[in-house]
Amino acid sequence: MKAIEARDVHLSFGETPALRGASVAVAPGEIVAIMGPSGSGKTTLLHCLAGILVPDAGEIHFDGRRIDTLNEHQRSVLRRDQFGFVFQFGQLVPELTAEENVALPLLLSGVKRAPALEQARPWFERLGLAGLQRRRSGELSGGQAQRVALARGLVARPGALFADEPTGALDSLTGEQVMDLLVASAREQGTTVVLVTHEARVAAYADRQVIVRDGKVNALVAA
Amino acid sequence: MTLLGLLEREPSHGYDLKRDYDTFFSRGKPLPFGQVYATLGRLARDGKIVIGEVEPGVGPERKRYVITERGATEVESWLTDPVEAEPSLQTVLFTKVVLALMLDRPAEEYLDRQRAAHLRRMKELTEIRRGGDLVDTMLADHGLFHLEADLHWIDTTVARLDALRKVVRR
Ligand SMILES: Nc1ncnc2c1ncn2[C@@H]1O[C@H](COP(=O)(O)OP(=O)(O)OP(=O)(O)O)[C@@H](O)[C@H]1O
Ligand SMILES: [Mg+2]
């Protein structure tokens, strides 16, 4: 049983081939790190797995269901109801407070404001952000904003979490705190995690690492 | 040196030295008493420690060891001198890569295997770190940062293999 799978995925941006036959399978509850050089296609692969981009060729499956053939509306419902996201840049909504940002996935899937904020609250303590609930994203440091984004990715207890350089803006101690939390929360909620990182120390938190090179996935040879 | 350093704190019995050593430095491999007393004997012979007041009773645990001026100086200079910055693994890996290219072997594959081995070790250390106390964490961190540095070197080398191949091929 695979929770998430890409089969022989190809995708080009105009003339630029970003993925050239990428295949990867992630088991339910597994945490997989995608590593590889800059420009190798990591983000593109993540976006394909998460139903954000549609491949030119190949298949994407989630939970036994093919998702690359769904229409835009169906994919956006799937993303909203099943997936959580953490991205490196420009991810918090600047008009909202930190706690509203964390509650956003719940609000978008129809949870009422009070219970949504109620569910968001414990995350501030867990991530060492107590007292920052009412700040807007412009009033947070890069690292604080990153932790708010992680809370937002996990608050709705998604089936899968897609994270692109989730520790990119953090110093190594804070980054490790965030990874400890990410792993602990994912395990506790049974969330499957696909994590893009260029940092080996971050990738070492995953159950398994794969390397993307020239748009293809190398499973690491067991030495 | 570790035992000498522990004595720099305060005069101690062999038993206490062993206990403190095991708590902070042994990493699961307790120091045998025999080795404790052998080391203390050597340090005393070299004038780095002396046996202080002997308490009434019998047995080596009655002896209290005291660091001398010479011993303290040695601890001081050991602490002050940086450890040799020896990039030993890189040397071995570098030799492997260059030879592989000279012999027309798949250097990239070897480096990928090395990367896998490094990542597996990093995963083990990360687990130790997550389950362990602060001492375990600090030791694991040291290993993790070193392995990470090696991985940077491996990544850079992979990216330069074509250029390096031209250099080493005659
Ligand atoms: N929106 C886009 N339009 C055109 N080309 C793109 C676009 N997004 C990515 N590319 C190209 O596709 C290739 C793969 O990009 P991708 O962002 O997946 O790399 P990456 O592995 O995530 O790199 P990085 O580590 O730098 O984030 C690159 O050559 C990139 O220039
Ligand atoms: Mg990217």
Image (cartoon, grey):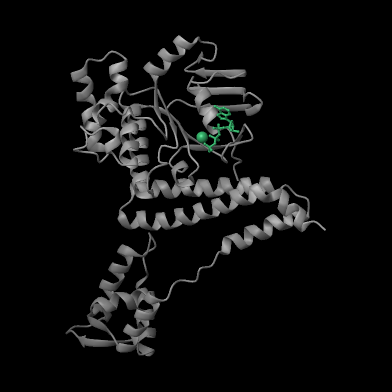
**In the image, what residue occupies the spot 72% across and 51% down?**
B163
Whether residue A2 can be seen here? no
Whether residue B111 can be seen here? yes
- Residue A76 figure quarter: top left
Q: Nearer the viewer, residue A133 or B95?
A: A133
The answer to whether residue B116 is above or below residue B81 is: above
Q: Position of residue A138 (x, y in %)?
A: 30, 35
- Residue A8 figure quarter: top right
Is B15 left, or right, of A190 in this rendering? left
Q: Nearer the viewer, residue A80 or B28?
A: A80
Give the farthest residue toward the right: B170
Q: Position of residue A69 (x, y in %)?
A: 55, 11
**In the image, what residue occupies the spot 76% across and 58% down?**
B168
> Which quadrant, please, contains the N terminus of chain B?
bottom left
Is B22 left, or right, of A51 in this rendering? left
Q: How many marks?
A: 0
The answer to whether residue B162 is above or below residue B8 is: above
Q: Nearer the viewer, residue B154 or A169?
A: A169
**In the image, what residue occupies the spot 36% across and 23% down?**
A158
**In the image, what residue occupies the spot 67% across and 46% down?**
B108
Q: Position of residue A42 (x, y in %)?
A: 54, 33
Q: Position of residue B166 (x, y in %)?
A: 77, 53
